[in-house]
Amino acid sequence: MELDLIILLVAGFLGGMLNAVAGGGSFLTLPALLFAGVSPVAANATGTAALLPGYIASAWRFRRDIGYPSGLGWGDIAVLSALGGSLGAILLVITSDRLFSAIIPWLILFATVLFALGPRLMAAGKSISEQKDAAQTNHIPPRRRWLNALLLFLACAYGGYFNGGLGILLLAAFSYMGQSNLHAMNGLKNVVSALLSCIAVFLYAWGGAIAFERLLPLALAAILGGYAGAVLAYRIPQRVLRACIVGIGGLLTLAFFLQQ
């Protein structure tokens, strides 16, 4: 078995496992695809496509836990996810490999910082949402509905362009929108991630940005890793996992900056 394939299988398995228990799988799939000779834009698109089955499975698993932000219903969520994911995917497809190579370290740095600050962002967002809940009735001002819609759209556009840190970004956004039930937020996060990733992957394929010869082994390994991660989810301390992911992100950021 060639070295490239071994690295893809290991990265896919570990990436699927990380996504199942804490997130951050793209921190492994992106560099593995780059090592295997896939161009930067195609590596990002192929990694997202490989992790898509895990998003769909998670969305189905948490379908009964979904809760919606203030002023937004299922139809709004679906439309905003599709539009935001489409915008991000189109921007990725038209981005040159040279430009994407230049911004990869900045994207990974942003995703790593976002992941590291995730608990604090969640706590701050929950505090603000509780204050909003205490200060208002069931009436949602039109301005707040538009702000919620814009925030979700921008988060989905980010996810369509670069998947790293998307889960934390969505959870933080939902907190600031007024949600405080973590189970409801996780359910919605999985649904939004699946929706925007589906439309993004379709546009990646349409734009010729997916390396299909590398996709199958990576996707199969990610599915197996997702199942393994579901088993280990309650056995590995979240602090340990988060520290490992932040460490990986930091090392990757440094490596990509040194390559430039």
Image (cartoon, rainbow, N blue to C red):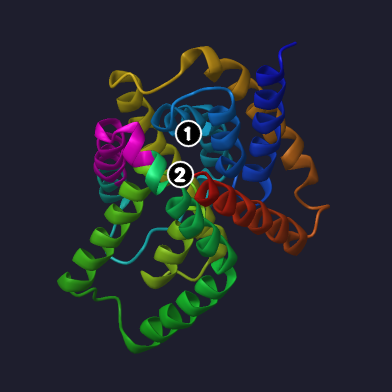
Q: In the rendered image, which residue does mark 1 sit on?
A: 48
* Residue kind at label 2, given as amino acid type: Asn
Q: How many marks?
A: 2
Q: Earlier in the sequence, mark 1 or mark 2?
A: 1
Residue 135 picture quarter? bottom left
Which residue is at 79% across, 53% downward?
Answer: 234
Measured as percent of width and height from the top left, residue 126 is found at 49, 76
Q: Which residue occupies the extreme right position in the image?
A: 235
User: Where does residue 162 sit, x and y in percent of width and height?
Assistant: 41, 44
Q: Closest to the observer: 93 or 74?
A: 93
Give the class, few, some or many, for how many residues have Cα within 10 Å of label 1's Cα (few <14, many ≥20).
many
Residue at position x 73%, y 40% from top? Answer: 229
Residue beneath disc 2 = 163
Residue at x-position 45% and y-position 44%: 163
Q: Give, as a single range, the part of the protein colored magenta.
A: 81-100
Q: Is residue 76 magenta?
A: no
Q: Is residue 122 visible?
A: yes
Residue 87 is a magenta residue: yes
Q: What secondary structure is the magenta-colored segment mainly? A: helix
Relative vertical location of residue 86 with respect to residue 9 in this rendering, above or below: below
User: Mark 1 belongs to which amino acid?
Assistant: Thr
Q: Secondary structure at mark 1?
A: helix
Residue at x 60% of width, y 31% of height: 32
